[in-house]
């Protein structure tokens, strides 16, 4: 069966992307209307940590953005690794499809497949001006041909005010003659050598510090002094990020484009702590997704639909009224536009998401595939004989050192051995076990559920041409 036929057959899995993505690449259909600009804001390693959602980190700007738009309270990345996740945002394809199997930088050197089309390329073909401020972390540059790359990623960019002003200057320089697609990729709250970029005061940002006694311990971490101190530093970086978003949104407003720009805010993967980043469990994938559309009449919406980062590119293309090329072999894209459901609190058909992981760093191989529904999360670990690796920045963290240095310490309710050594299949009833600890995969009472989820995962892997699925390698019949 051909890929397009598999995608059509998988409609029940939420894999079809709708008419907006089925035609040839073309310009906006309504050139006489207002501009349809796009601002995509990507945080780096921010978990589901917003004060408006009960968190103790202060995020007044993002909280206010929620009141102006829609917060998807069940938004999930497709992978919990920086480059792979960003590649999904840019391509609308899962990382096992687009080739970005792991990190792009240094010796890791993963990159997109040669024939992949990205958002900046597709939007440029339709008359958009494009720019990136900050972190890209996807290769090769030729496939992400932004017209401008401002403040390219050094080891990390923490000057959020400078980033905002560069973005504002670029927006004003466009003069309103053509619509724009602007991506702002922050380095906060990713770790660095000083542990979160908190070693100095940054321009135009009121420094927000936290006491370790005031932090909220996530369900995947133990309550240890070293963990609390680490979380306090992470909180400060999140608050700096929040301030930077505020300056950026003021620049957008002052440039006269607040009313014609779709704003999307999200993070690439879970917080950089043990049991979150680099894992497909809930803390590694569940993150904020805020969308503010000038066209939505109902604001301050909290939508509980299960949505995925695979839906971001279709949403952007829908807003821009742009479609991929008619002969693009990866069309239709597997996600769906979220624009039609921005004013809904729950949406029919958005009841499951899929996730994938292959590598993080080049020497950290642990392939996993997963499907999550309203009630269950199911994981297929393709190489269960391997030990689950821990990202190097997490290994160097005070939290990890505190955990491995404390006899009997757990990752939440999970022992270190259970975290490191996993069976081939895991099934959790998240309705009663949200921490995903009690594995039901071998329980006879869940045999029917297992059979159903196995089939759904296999159908999805086939439809998205997962090279780790037997028979999928070289799916398009390339000659050798």
Image (cartoon, rainbow, N blue to C red):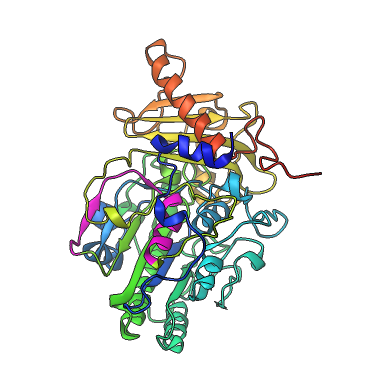
Q: Residue furthest top?
A: 444
Residue 412 at least partly seen = no
Residue 147 position within the rendered picture, expressed as x and y whole percent measured from the top left: 56, 78
Residue 229 position within the rendered picture, expressed as x and y whole percent measured from the top left: 42, 54
Q: Residue furthest left?
A: 298
Which of these two is toward me, 302 or 97? 97
Q: Toward which corner of the image does residue 204 lie, by quadrant?
A: bottom left
In the rendered image of this protein, does residue 206 appear above or below residue 285?
below
Q: Quadrant of the N terminus?
A: top right
| Residue 315 magenta-highlighted | yes
Is residue 315 toward the left or the right of residue 304 in the image?
Answer: right
Residue drawn at (66%, 68%) of the image: 142
Residue 222 position within the rendered picture, expressed as x and y whole percent measured from the top left: 41, 39
Residue 231 at least partly seen = yes
- Magenta-highlighted residues: 297-319
Q: Toward which corner of the image does residue 239 lie, by quadrant?
A: bottom left
């Amino acid at each position: 069966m051909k890929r397009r036929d598999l995608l059509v057959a998988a409609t029940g899995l939420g894999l079809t992307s709708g008419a907006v993505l089925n035609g040839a690449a073309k310009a906006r259909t309504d050139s006489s209307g207002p501009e349809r600009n796009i601002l995509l804001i990507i945080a780096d390693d921010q978990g589901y940590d917003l004060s408006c959602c009960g968190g103790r980190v202060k995020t007044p700007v993002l909280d206010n953005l929620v009141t102006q738009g829609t917060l998807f309270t069940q938004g999930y990345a497709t992978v919990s690794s920086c480059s792979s996740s960003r590649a999904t945002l840019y391509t609308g394809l899962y990382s096992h499809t687009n080739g970005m199997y792991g990190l792009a930088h240094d010796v890791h050197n993963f990159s997109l497949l040669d024939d992949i089309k990205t958002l900046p390329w597709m939007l440029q073909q339709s008359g958009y001006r494009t720019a990136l401020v900050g972190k890209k972390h996807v290769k090769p540059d030729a496939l992400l041909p932004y017209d401008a790359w401002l403040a390219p990623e050094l080891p990390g960019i923490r000057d959020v005010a400078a980033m905002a002003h560069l973005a504002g200057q670029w927006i004003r320089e466009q003069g309103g003659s053509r619509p724009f697609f602007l991506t702002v990729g922050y380095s906060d709250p990713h770790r660095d050598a000083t542990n979160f970029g908190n070693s100095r005061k940054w321009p135009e940002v009121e420094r927000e510090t936290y006491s370790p006694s005031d932090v909220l311990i996530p369900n995947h971490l133990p309550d240890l002094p070293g963990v609390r101190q680490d979380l306090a530093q992470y909180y400060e970086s999140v608050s700096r990020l929040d301030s930077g978003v505020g300056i950026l949104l003021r620049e957008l407003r002052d440039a006269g484009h607040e009313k014609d720009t779709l704003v999307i805010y999200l993070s690439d993967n879970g917080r950089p702590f043990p049991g979150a980043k680099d894992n497909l469990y809930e803390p590694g994938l569940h993150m904020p997704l805020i969308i503010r559309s000038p066209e939505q009449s109902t604001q301050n919406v909290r939508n509980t639909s299960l949505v995925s980062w695979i839906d971001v590119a279709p949403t952007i293309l829908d807003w821009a009224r742009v479609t991929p090329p008619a002969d693009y072999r990866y069309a239709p894209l597997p996600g769906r536009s979220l624009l039609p459901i921005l004013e809904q609190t729950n949406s029919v058909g958005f009841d499951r998401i899929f996730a994938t992981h292959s590598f993080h760093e080049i020497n950290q191989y642990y392939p996993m595939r997963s499907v999550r529904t309203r009630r269950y999360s199911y994981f297929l670990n393709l190489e269960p004989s391997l030990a689950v690796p821990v990202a190097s920045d997490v290994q160097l963290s005070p939290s990890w050192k505190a955990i491995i240095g404390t006899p009997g310490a757990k990752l939440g309710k999970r022992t270190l051995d259970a975290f490191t050594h996993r069976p081939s299949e895991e099934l959790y009833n998240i309705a009663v076990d949200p921490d995903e600890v009690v594995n039901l995969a071998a329980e006879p009472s869940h045999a029917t559920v297992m059979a159903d989820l196995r089939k759904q995962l296999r159908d999805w892997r086939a439809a998205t041409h997962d090279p780790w699925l037997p028979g999928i390698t070289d799916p398009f019949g390339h000659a050798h």
